[in-house]
Image (cartoon, helix red, strand yellow):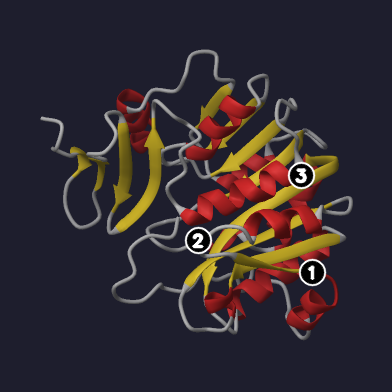
Amino acid sequence: MRSASLVLRPGADGALLVPDLAYERAFTLRVGRTDQSYVDLDDPLRLEFDYVQRLVDVLDSVAEREQRLRVIHVGGAGMTLPRYVAATRPSSAQIVLEPDTELTAFVRRNLPLPTRSGIKVRGTDGRRGIAGLRDGYADLVIIDAFVGARVPAELTTAEFLADARRALSDHGVIIINLTDRGPLCYARRVLAGVHLAFPHVLLCAESSTLKGRRFGNVIIAGGATPLPYASIADRTGRPPFPYRVLHGGRLRQLLAGSAPFSDDDAEQSPEPGPGLKHFG
């Protein structure tokens, strides 16, 4: 029955695909109470989640359409972003690092990847997967990994971010999706770690998140070469709920006094709080 969900694991911490009744082959992947991914098999450019659209705003600003890329995705779930890259840059080589092999098998069985997509999925976590890459391999590293509604602590430390920099080319860019709320105590520390590894950085989020009025997504990008700040700000500023881009002096002000997380004091991202359903 089309209206019925497809269940991998039942229960409060289970995993299921919820059909979108408006589109014949579109589903939301829900893990626990968190909506992790939205996939439309007929239109990989349909990006329902605002934060995914903003990740794509950064991606499309740093890499032209049709450009061949080597992309590492830390976090797989429904593989929305790998599908988007495969559709817009069809000759690209992509590696998805996803330790939940049961979830990957479920997704690939019910939401199959396009033939000759260039997407390879490795059943390992981001830390081990990045460590196994050769120096300078990737053009992009995209970190969008959650356990429930929280980012794993080991993916935000200075040691991990330095290793991600090693795996990126001289023009490589890292893009990270986090969740927090102003005054961004957690995101500031992640930003400090990115700034330690990359000379050019930015942070973007909705004004309400920056001001502490609501918990939401925070996107951080770091580049070995200057980032296209104006293009990113233009793209992320267009939607009905725009994101503000912070860089330069405003970013230095945000960074003041913030120390990067290390492997010794790493923390998961904050709990989103009651009534908040999905962020990653």
- Residue that mark 1 sits on: 247
Q: Name the residue under label 3.
A: 62
- Image side of residue 198 versus residue 121, left or right: right
Q: Residues within 10 Å of mark 1 (few under 14, many from 20)?
A: some
At horizontal 31% and vertical 51% (from top left) the residue drawn is 31
- Bin the neighbour count of mark 2 within 10 Å (Cα to Cα): few under 14, some 14-19, many 20 and up: many
| Mark 3 closeness class: few <14, some 14–19, many ≥20 residues within 10 Å | many
Quarter of the image for residue 279 reads bottom left
Where, quadrant-wise, is the C terminus in this rendering? bottom left
At 30% across and 76% down in the image, what residue appears?
A: 274
Q: Residue at x 66, y 63 (%)?
A: 157
Q: Horizontal placement of 88 versus 44: left or right?
A: right
| Placement of 22 over or under 224, stated as above or below | above
Q: Which one is closest to the eye, mark 2 or mark 3? A: 3
Percent across and percent down for residue 171 are 86, 42
Marks 1/3: CA–CA distance: 16 Å
Q: In this view, does 93 lie above or below 53?
A: above
What's the amino acid at mark 3? Val
As helix, strand or loop, the secondary structure at mark 2 comes to: loop
Measure the C-alpha gap from mark 2 to mark 3: 24 Å
Q: Distance between the residues labelled 1 and 2?
A: 23 Å
Residue 144 visible, this orientation: no
Q: Which badge, 2 or 3, comes first in the chain's sequence?
A: 3
Residue of label 2: 151
Q: Can residue 13 be seen in this snapshot?
A: yes
Q: What element carries label 1?
A: loop
